[in-house]
Image (cartoon, rainbow, N blue to C red):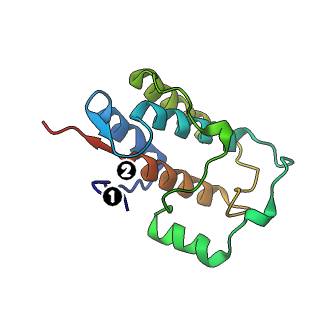
């Protein structure tokens, strides 16, 4: 685990933005992405999984077993270093934190209001809505754990 990384857990989607708001303008990053880049990535993933149709082609050879899926859901932890689809990797390093945090807020609202996700997860396969919600919380906690508040 990356030294200095925080342990975070979100039990529901409504817990994410208070943490992001706490970090805007008052944080530093331990990983590759800044807070703005992290917010952009999380927003892109939320919108993507909410909007992709069930007919989206999926590479089932990437699916992991039920034991690994259970482990992620039980521990609330995603292993570090998993590659993200290029469509959701933030390339721009000069993003505005406040604007990206607001986009994340809107993406969470969009996700919550959507009838989806309908598409299977790229590693876990078909998920129920409750599983998708839990996974979104785990995913957000994973990335935001690399963003630490600056000392006062």
Q: Residue 7's mark?
A: 1
Question: Where in the figure is residue 70, as x and y percent of width and height?
Answer: 57, 73
- Which is nearer the eye, 124 or 150? 150
Image position of 136 with respect to 111: above or below? below
* Residue positioned 47% across, 38% down in the render: 38
Given contact means CB atoms under 8 Å apart, are the residues at marks 2 and 1 in contact?
yes
Q: Secondary structure at mark 2?
A: loop
* Residue positioned 35% across, 55% down in the render: 8
- Quarter of the image for residue 62 reads bottom right
Q: Residue 145's mark?
A: 2
- Quarter of the image for residue 17 reads top left
Question: Where in the figure is residue 124, as x and y percent of width and height?
Answer: 67, 64
Mark 2: few, some, or many residues within 10 Å (few <14, many ≥20)?
some
The quarter in which the N terminus is drawn is bottom left
Mark 1: few, some, or many residues within 10 Å (few <14, many ≥20)?
few
Question: Where in the figure is residue 109, as x and y percent of width and height?
Answer: 55, 34
Give the residue at the far bottom of this rendering. Answer: 67
- Quarter of the image for residue 34 reads top left
- Which is nearer the eye, 151 or 50? 151
Question: Where in the figure is residue 145, as x and y percent of width and height?
Answer: 37, 50
* Residue positioned 76% across, 51% down in the render: 119
Q: Residue 28's mark?
A: none
Mark found first going from the N terminus, 2 or 1: 1
Image position of 81 with respect to 75: above or below? above
């Amino acid at each position: 685990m990356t030294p200095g990384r925080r342990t975070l857990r979100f039990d529901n989607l409504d817990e994410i933005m208070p943490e992001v708001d706490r970090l805007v303008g008052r944080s530093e990053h331990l990983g590759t992405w800044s807070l703005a880049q992290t917010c952009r990535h999380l927003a892109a993933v939320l919108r993507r999984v909410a909007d992709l149709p069930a007919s989206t082609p999926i590479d089932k050879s990437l699916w992991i077993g039920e034991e690994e899926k259970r482990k992620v859901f039980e521990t609330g932890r995603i292993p570090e270093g998993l590659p993200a689809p290029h469509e959701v990797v933030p390339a721009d390093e000069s993003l505005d934190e406040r604007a990206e945090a607001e986009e994340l807020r809107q993406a969470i609202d969009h996700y919550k209001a959507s009838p989806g996700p309908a598409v299977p997860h790229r590693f876990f396969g078909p998920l129920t809505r409750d599983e998708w919600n839990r996974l979104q919380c785990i995913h957000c906690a994973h990335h935001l754990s690399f963003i630490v508040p600056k000392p006062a």
